[in-house]
Image (cartoon, rainbow, N blue to C red):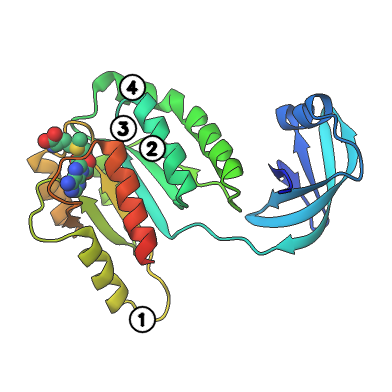
Amino acid sequence: MTRRRWIADTFTDSTASLLGAQAEHLARVLRAQPGMNADVVAGARVYHATIASVASEEVVFALLEEIPAESALPITLLLSIFKFDRMEWAIEKATELGVGSIVPVIARRTEKHLAQAADKRVERWRRLAQEAAKQSRRADIPAIAEPIALAARLAQTSSAQQILLAEDEQNNTLRRRIETALASAESELPDFELAIGPEGGWTPEELTLFAKHNWQSASLGPRILRAETAAITALAITSALL
Ligand code: SAM
């Protein structure tokens, strides 16, 4: 039977604690008792742990031995903000697929009311990522950045291989872009940044801006995918090749 997995709110070298709602849930709903076993994620590492003390405001675990855990993929997903219900689905699936971090991007065709509301949604997106990380037994939680305008994000320097998914790219598939990047990488696995446009797609000016910042465009095939489908497909292809 797989042990339940908890993501610690605070931790030391030998203990980890759940606070607030997590502690209350464990103490009151699950009636946890000292001595119960669990897996606890603390500082991107996973430990076999046992409950040392239970109170509704804090449950303390004694960390026993570290469990080998899959680390996140070296992929940052630049996700243009689109209809929140679909975007939240994409954040959850991207987390299950191992994405390293997600940057919500305000693109030209991001609907205005969504762009304005995004700042207030980030905490919810972070909670969704934490739940999805726990459910998929990840050793860590993908970082969800503050929403940022595309031009501002592109102006940031990055050493990653930067690939924008463009529905009208005719010559280069994502597979070819990744394989070329891996072939030219020396020893270690490069980081990747994958950019997904909004429901209305990228504007010609945005495509020019990507090119100016040396992003490479890649196709996911001849069909037009919804943004959330494109995000999941791009992650799945990239992680399979890594
Ligand atoms: N401009 C599209 C249209 O004509 O309906 C809408 C954009 S699509 C819904 C949203 C985003 O998903 C695109 O900007 C692109 O990043 C990605 N995408 C969708 N289909 C793709 C494909 N076949 N190849 C590469 N990217 C794709």
Which of pointers 2 and 1 lies earlier in the amino acid sequence?
2
Mark 2 residue type = Ala
Dot label at residue 90: 2
Which residue is denoted by mark 3 in the rendering? 81
Which of pointers 3 and 1 lies earlier in the amino acid sequence?
3
Mark 3 residue type = Ile
Which residue is denoted by mark 4 in the rendering? 116
State the residue at coordinates (24%, 29%).
110
Residue 161 visible in rendering: yes
State the residue at coordinates (50%, 28%).
124
Q: Are marks 3 and 4 in contact (CB under 8 Å)?
A: no
Neighbourhood count class around disc 3 (C-alpha, 10 Å): few under 14, some 14–19, many 20 upward:
many
Query: How far across and how far down the image is residue 137, in percent?
Result: 60, 49
For residue 223, side relative to residue 85 (left or right)? left
Mark 4 residue type = Gln
- As drawn, 62 above or below 110: below
For residue 138, side relative to residue 58 (left or right)? left
Which of pointers 3 and 4 lies earlier in the amino acid sequence?
3
Q: Nearer the viewer, mark 2 or mark 1?
A: 2
- As drawn, 241 above or below 124: below
Residue 166 visible in rendering: no
Locate ligand 1 by image quadrant: top left
Query: How far across and how far down the image is residue 191, in percent?
Result: 38, 63
State the residue at coordinates (47%, 32%).
125
